[in-house]
Amino acid sequence: MTSYRHHPERIAALVQDDRVHRDLYLSDEIFALEQEHLFANTWVYLGHASQVSEPGDFVTQDVAGRPLLMVRQPDGAVHVMYNRCAHKGTQLVTDECGNTGRFFRCPYHAWTYKLDGAPLGLPLKNGYEGTQLKACESGQGLSVVKHVKVYRDFVFVRLSDSGPSFEDYFGEVLGAIDNMVDRSPEGKLTVGGGVLRNIVHCNWKMYLENINDTVHPMSTHESATKAAEALWEGRAPTDPKPMAMEQMLPFGSGYEFFDKMGGRVFANGHSVLGVNFSIHSNYAQLPEYEAAMRAAHGEERAAEILQRSPQNSVFYPSLSVKGSPQAIRVIRPLAANRTLIEAWSFRATGAPALLFERVMSYNRLVFSPMSVVAHDDVHLFESIQQGLRAGGNEWVSLHRNYDPAELAQETITTNGTNELLMRNQFRAWAKSMAAGMEAAA
Amino acid sequence: MNGDPRDFAAHEAALLDERRLDDWLALFAEDGHYWVPLLGAAQADPFSHNSLAYEDRLLLQLRVDRLKNPRAHSQHPASHSQHVLQPSRIEHESAGEVRLRTPFIYIEARGESQVLLAGTARHHLVRASRGWSIREKRIDLLDAARALPAIQLFI
């Protein structure tokens, strides 16, 4: 395989206007360069502030191979630090989450740190007199991630010092987070019910592309939707559907449905699929909840929030949001051919318990390792990862509805089956890789 | 299956491993559930916390029907399972019902890959006209919350 390090022009050549090269998915070197540049240069989702509700609460999370620590401060702020003792490099905490009390204490030599990472104390202090410890990095306490943005309790980080501001990077797509948070009449979400964690043996970009792919459900999910349809056949349209059926049956919708749902792309790889309607649009109405929403947000805004339930909103490169049901997926790349997918559920404060039941049911049916729907997706991703190794054709087609005019525009609204939503991701990929490599040069 | 209820778990697992899924499904009571909590043995109920699976008969039927469909792409090649069980112990017994506890190792093999899971199956059985029926089969995995690859059959 070609070498890409020190050759940004070779990386740029992997993304053409209407197709991409297989090395994007297969190359270990490209993966290493993505970890160094793309994931440092973009705003990556770390976690939700409700995971650390009390002072001293922490969550550990690797981002782009770097172990990070998200911590609630005594003043209520959320800080992010590198999970590395300033002394020898020990991880200060190795649990996924917990409460550290008033300070962190390294388990190796008992160096201690305040919750914001400032140095607190160390044993045998006299031994450091006359040394340079205080002046060097190891004397400064924990390294802090400087670029942290808590947007309506969604915590994002940018590891690189250069790169776009949070608002410039995400722009209008932030409306998808607003939509989900405002589904709480009190404007507050908390994570609930734990996280479903899947290991998929494919490249992370493939998973993210599929979030924007509406042509696959009819063929990929045929076994699940045909089974659901057969079980439901003969029932009157007025028969109340069990929640699982309400959630499963729309996967069997035809090409026209998915085409008409519409999509929109934004600068930097973000997109919204289902700008007109989606497979989530016809969940049972809840009159009392809707009344509470109107009381909280006003008639017009409440209608806007509740009528808008896109299929997926992609916050490139790490997060996919479903306003209804209140679910997110987080894409955590582990290797060129291995990706961790997390599915989180949210409780909306002031909303009926049924909404939480709905998101737990959806995540269980669709995003659990024991899902009924996802097995066929996962099999196909893993199949692509193998299939791309075949010779003869080194390119992946993204031609559907390609129009050269799209190259000059940033925000475009289009039909739901247009592969523009994927082309847009790869254009952003090339841009972020190039920016990172130039900054590093 | 009218004999010793302690034989039930082995019989049920054998139906799964032989892929006699219709016979397996017929073991469930009308209100029966299959439950794999995300917190394993620590989980109190399937409503306040999510589960890897929580399925009633309708969903179990859907799953079984799906597996029979030739377009169940993920079953090319097909998955096979092997349950390795410790002897079942009776946790509780009263008129017409019994609760069993059966530690196990479960292997799901497909092509070149294998998934290995360990845990304890807990059966809540009720006496029916034809023998014992499953009101709930609960599977407490050793580490249910860890990141898992696809588990396609029934633990």
Image (tube, rainbow, N blue to C red):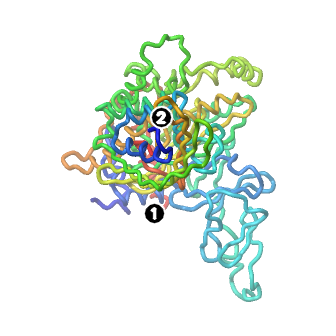
Picture quarter containing residue A8?
Answer: bottom left
Q: Position of residue A96 (x, y in %)?
A: 61, 57
Rendered position, A341 above or below A334? above
Residue at the limit of the structure toward the front, as seen here: B3
Given this view, does label 2 or label 1 mark the residue nearer the observer? 2
Of all residues shown, which one is farthest toward the left?
Answer: A392
- Give the number of the disc on residue A29: none
Residue A419 is at least partly visible in this image: no
User: Helix, strand or loop at disc 2?
Assistant: strand
Chain letter of mark 2 equals B
Crowd class of label 2 (few under 14; some 14 to 19; many from 20; radius 10 Å): some
Residue drawn at 66 percent across, 39 percent down: B48
Percent position of residue A232, x then y: 45, 19
Estimate the x, y position of residue A37 in percent, counting from the top left: 48, 57
Residue beneath the point at 52% across and 41% down: B137
Q: Position of residue A426 (x, y in %)?
A: 40, 43
Indicate left or right for A362 with A349 as reference. Answer: left
| Front-most of residues A427 and A75 | A75
Tag 1 subunit: A
Q: Name the residue carrying label 2.
A: B131
Q: Amino acid at mark 1?
A: Ala
Amino acid type of the residue tagged 2 in the rendering? Gly
- Looking at the image, can residue A173 be seen? yes
The answer to whether B108 appears left or right of B134 in the picture is: left
In this view, the residue farthest toward the right is: A75
Identify the residue shown where x is 30% and y is 47%: A21
As measured in the structure, the alpha-carbon distance from the residue carrying label 2 to the one carrying label 1 is: 74 Å
Residue carrying label 1: A441
